[in-house]
Image: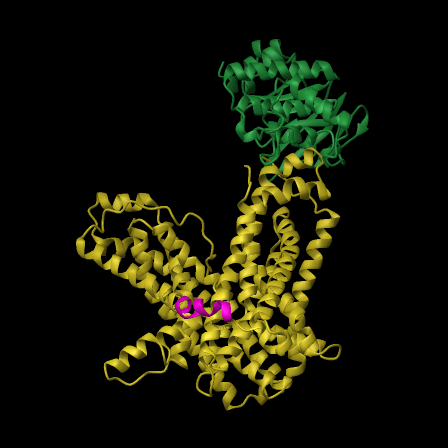
Chain colours: A yellow, B green
Amino acid sequence: MADSTQPLTFGLRLGAGAAATFVLALTLGTLGAVLARAGSFAALGPADWAALRFTVTQATVSAALSLALAIPVARALARRRFAGRGALITLLGAPFILPVIVAVMGILGLFGRAGLLNDGLAALGFDRISIYGFGGVVLAHVFFNLPLAVRLLLQGWLAIPAERFRLAAALGFGPSDVARHLERPMLRAVAPGIFVTIFLICLTSFAVALTLGGGPKATTVELAIYQAFRFDFDPGRAAHLASLQLALCAVTALVAARITVPSAFGAGLDRPVARRDAGGAGLRALDAGLLTLATLFLLAPLAAVFVSGLPRLAALPEAVWRAAFRSVLVAIGSTALTVALALPLALAIARRGRARMLETVGMLPLATSSLVTGTGLFLLLRPVASPGDLALPVTVAVNAAMALPFVLRALIPAARDLEADYGRLALSLGLSGTARLRFLTLPRLRRPLGFAAGLTAALSMGDLGVIALFADADHATLPLQLYRLMGAYRMADAAGAAVLLLALSLGLFWIFDRGGRADAGA
Amino acid sequence: MLVLEKIVITQDDFRLTADFAVAKGARVAVIGPSGAGKSTLLSVISGFFPAASGRVLWDGRDISRLPPGQRPLSILFQDQNLFPHLTVAQNVGLGLRPNLRLSAVETARVGEALARAGLGGLGERRPGTLSGGQQSRVALARVLLRARPLMLLDEPFSALGPALKAEMLDLVAEIAAETGATVLMVSHDPDDARRFSSETIVVAEGRAAPPEPTGALLDNPPPALAAYLGT
């Protein structure tokens, strides 16, 4: 069928243009402010170089470890079918919307100074070990990124056509033959992309370094920006560090652009492939053991948070509830803003055959760090308002921009389908403007919109990034309040707040996602 | 009268020309090998694909630059003629007002059109709950209601069995007679062409030929059509 790309309507052009301008201002605009302030790299001292080294080392080790551990787990998931397999795959997606600080609480509950591991060591007469520093940062990053790596690898496994495995069975391949002829070539193709994805996440991760790192030996560039800002009151130094972080992200993003980077939400992960090559009892026991360990590694920290936090929930101080209320408002605000940005962008991208520019703009926040954006906003807005007053609006804007790439990834394919399936019919009936939005776009995009909104709300609810730069005691969000409780060693209250934060994040995700599914009709 | 004036359609190395008129009220089949450009020809008339040169005229007025929804025609595609998330009545109502703000009189007209298409009482259903034949009837009810003077059918009934297809063509004929519409129907089936259309346009070898009487054309086909028909 000879299809033509239809011209964009005025409203869509306006909406997409405004959204793109907003994102550009928030990413490249703040960047310009930072660079203008930073001047040259000459002023970087030994501490800054140490931060750079630590950042790159921990990101490399975290990414390598996540990937290496994920390979046997993904292989086990790919070749086994068992009750609860679907639930386990869903669970592997959960860390994406899990507030970082909650996971850190859980990790401390297990591996921290007063955690189960150290209690065990002490009971056996060993010295207690500390996980603060390099080890803790890497452990937390593996906790978050191992599941992501497993999901992405599983996509790779399922992308091997079932016919290949049938052929392998017909030729009498054993597990090592399958590994050699089918699995290793696949891994060589997908592993570099997964490594870079995780490396980039660890590069810009701030909350983990804030809570588990610190000190001269374990400070990331992001953390150094924060410290220059909060403790040294030195925006110039923060700007220097921010441009360093920027260079790091830019180089990584350039590398990533040369490698195919996988998308995080693949469809059809539940599809089992008949495998006849891995039936041995030893292999079966190995896979069962691996899957059990992986599940425990994911669930045990959360269980630790629940056990210590649930009883405290009712007795939480009022400040925590106030912070929770603020966080919910911030989450709803960012969600509304992200949807308002993403919808016109996705529709414009879908309607134009080639809209690489718009797509690139939408993905830009992936390569920017929220602390750099925050520093830039501070430098730009300092003349007009005080940081405390700006804390919540700035957090809403930055969270919205940071969630945008994920929201676009969920919306663009659906918007393309919508255009391909119903674009002609709508045009032939003259359906346009708000009528088209109401009777065609919103009903057809309801599911991905609900999912994307849930994702944004949960990410924003759990975010501990730019808010830490700006907020004073009166403007703290729940993650920041939780961080302060931990800093004051009020661990019981912190655990209670962690349970509350977890419930609110997952609850918001569930409500939005559910709203998208209800009464879908057709 | 529909006039295709020196139309040239190009897309990559595909090229199709058309230069002819179709009389008002005529029922014309468009027939030819697949890939010859039958659907593309309808896309140009309905405004989904721009011709490289030439004009489309209706009653002497150049409609080449109008957007699809404003052209004096209704088109039914091979599939996706209904919105699955809207009710049957809403799908039909869109033909009257795309914003669905229907007056009481208009709502009543939707009901009449549905009854006329044999869908009385099904207005609140979703298309997914109807059979294929019923779904075709919903789309035809909307065509009836829009009452545009030109009707383009791009094989909308090709998924239906022979008996249902004949039923639908009868309904199309009724609607066309009632609204006085000119009908252009893409078809793969010479029997459909014989039964439904007095004239036929052959699209083959880069050219859409002027309409000719169907019976004579099929009884004594030119070489390109003969190759396609296998006679």
- Taking depth in this image into account, of A339 and B148 the one nearest to the observer is A339
Does A322 appear above or below B57? below
Relative to A180, is A474 above or below?
below
Q: Residue at x 55, y 70 (%)?
A: A478
Give the image location of residue A503, x and y in percent.
49, 61
Is A498 part of what is drawn in magenta?
Answer: no
Is A132 situated left or right of A257 in this image?
A: left
Q: Residue at x 77, y 20 (%)?
A: B1
Residue A437: which quarter of the image? Answer: top right
On the image, the x and y values in percent for residue A34 come to 64, 78
Q: Is residue A307 magenta?
A: yes
Query: Residue A291: x percent and y percent?
Result: 30, 59
At horizontal 62% and vertical 65% (from top left) the residue drawn is A330
Which quadrant of the figure has residue B205?
top right
From where the camera sits, is residue A513 visible? yes
Residue B179: x %, y % from top left: 74, 17
Principal secondary structure, stretch drawn in magenta:
helix
Can I make out residue B217 in this image? no
Residue furthest to the left in view is A281
Q: Quadrant of the C terminus of chain A?
A: top right
Which span of residues is magenta-colored? A305-315
